[in-house]
Structures are given as C-alpha cells and as structure tokens.
Image (tube, helix red, strand yellow):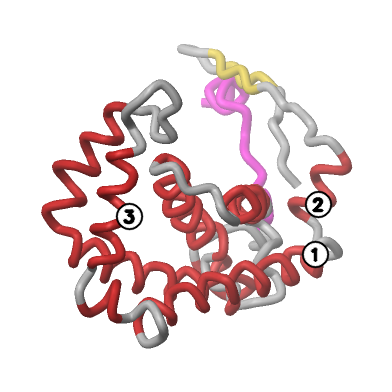
C-alpha cells in the first residue's frame, strides 16, 4: 500500500512538512495486493511467451537469417521507416527519430539486429520467471516504442498497454514468481520494518 504521510516535525532549526495522500482502493488492490497477483501472472506469462517467441525466431528460427546472421531485417525496416518519413501522409513523424535511424541504427544494423534479438528473448524469460518483472516490462516498452516511432503498429499497442500495467504493478506483478524473493533482498516492497521509538528533539534538549 502506497501512502504519503502528513505530519510536522519541529526542531530548533527547521520544520519538516510531509503530506500523506491515500491511494484509491481499487488501484491499491490491482497494483499492490497479493490477490491481484494472479491477474499479473497471466499477463506476464502471455506477454513473456510472445517476447520469447519473437526473440527465438530471430536467433534460431525463420527470421534468423534476416536478423542474427545478416541484420538485413533491421536494415530494410530502417530504410522503410526513413522512406515513410516523407510526404504529406508520413507514417514516421519525428525528425529527431529519423536522424537516430539514419545515423545511429543504419550504420550498425547488424549489431542492432543482434541486440534486438537477445533483448526480446531476455525480456520474455524475465517476464515468465517473474524476475524483476517491472524492469523487464520497461525495456519491453522501450522496444515497443521504437517500433511505433518507426511506423509499425502491429501488436505493439497491446504490448504497450500490458507492459504499462506490469510497471504500475511492480509490487505484486512478480509475487507469483522470483520477484517474491528478489525484491525483498533489495529492501522493497515486502519487508516488514518495526518503527523504533524516537525522542522529540525539543524534549531531549530540555532534559540536558
């Protein structure tokens, strides 16, 4: 449960004012409860399978020749996106993105193709295992937006919606997965802390 607390702590030198805003109950249930983790398990498994399938196809499957071996798939995709940036009904609207494609991707299309294939596979495995699910979903979103910026729609809107959901549900999306054990080691979000009693600074000073 996310909370923003409101209280004031007065010291001889400064006052700290913190505001506490409650999370809506529905959002708290969907994005933070253990009960909703079953929903995110289904989302993770489906989305992870799709990423694994895409990456494996580029590494060892039907798309291997165009991506892992030659990179011509990325080269053709990039040239097509650059071509679609011209004309009154251009599919690629951002000049800065066209510059990245022309000067960043095109000269290194084989490297980009191989990184893309490996990234898709790793993202998929992480989502299926529930290992740093929100981080995996974030990088998946980054890939999805590169495709969308390049004029490719396909299944990207669905991937984006589900990916955003997993990022928002970072607290419970991987509860039925490795995140249940990994995230507490990072100090969040399921550790239980006991508040230690503290003495008011003014009272402490008055006793000296």
For the record, the magenta segment spans: 193-208
Q: Nearer the viewer, residue 20 or 208?
A: 20
Label 1: element kind: helix
Cα gap from disc 2 to disc 1, whole angstroms: 9 Å
Q: Nearer the viewer, mark 3 or mark 1?
A: 3
Q: Residue at x 80, y 43 (%)?
A: 27
7 sits left or right of 28 in the view:
left
* Disc 1 packing (10 Å; few <14; some 14–19; many ≥20): few
Cα gap from disc 3 to disc 1, whole angstroms: 35 Å
Residue at the spot of label 1: 39
Q: Is residue 14 above or below residue 194?
A: above
Q: Is residue 28 above or below residue 208?
A: below
Q: Residue at x 61, y 48 (%)?
A: 157
Whether label 2 touches label 1, CB < 8 Å: yes
2 or 3: tag closer to the N-terminus? 2
Please tell me the numbered disc located at residue 77.
3
Residue 107 in the image, given as x and y percentages of width and height: 11, 53
* Disc 2 packing (10 Å; few <14; some 14–19; many ≥20): some
Q: Nearer the viewer, residue 190 or 72?
A: 72
Residue at the spot of label 2: 30
Residue 176 in the image, given as x and y percentages of width and height: 71, 75
Q: Nearer the viewer, residue 78 or 204?
A: 78
């Amino acid at each position: 449960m996310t909370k923003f607390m409101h209280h004031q702590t007065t010291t001889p030198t400064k006052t700290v004012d913190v505001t506490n805003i409650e999370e809506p109950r529905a959002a708290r249930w969907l994005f933070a409860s253990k009960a909703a983790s079953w929903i995110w398990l289904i989302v993770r498994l489906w989305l992870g399978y799709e990423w694994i399938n895409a990456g494996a196809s580029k590494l060892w499957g039907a798309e291997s020749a165009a991506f892992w071996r030659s990179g011509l798939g990325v080269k053709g995709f990039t040239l097509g996106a650059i071509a679609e940036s011209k004309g009154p009904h251009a599919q690629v609207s951002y000049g800065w993105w066209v510059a990245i494609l022309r000067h960043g991707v095109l000269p290194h299309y084989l490297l980009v193709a191989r990184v893309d294939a490996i990234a898709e596979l790793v993202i998929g495995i992480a989502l299926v295992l529930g290992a740093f699910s929100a981080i995996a979903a974030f990088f998946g979103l980054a890939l999805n937006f590169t495709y969308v910026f390049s004029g490719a729609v396909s299944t990207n809107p669905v991937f984006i919606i589900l990916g955003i959901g997993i990022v928002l549900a970072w607290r419970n999306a991987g509860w039925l997965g490795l995140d249940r054990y990994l995230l507490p080691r990072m100090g969040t979000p399921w550790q239980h802390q006991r508040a230690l009693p503290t003495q008011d600074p003014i009272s402490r000073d008055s006793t000296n």
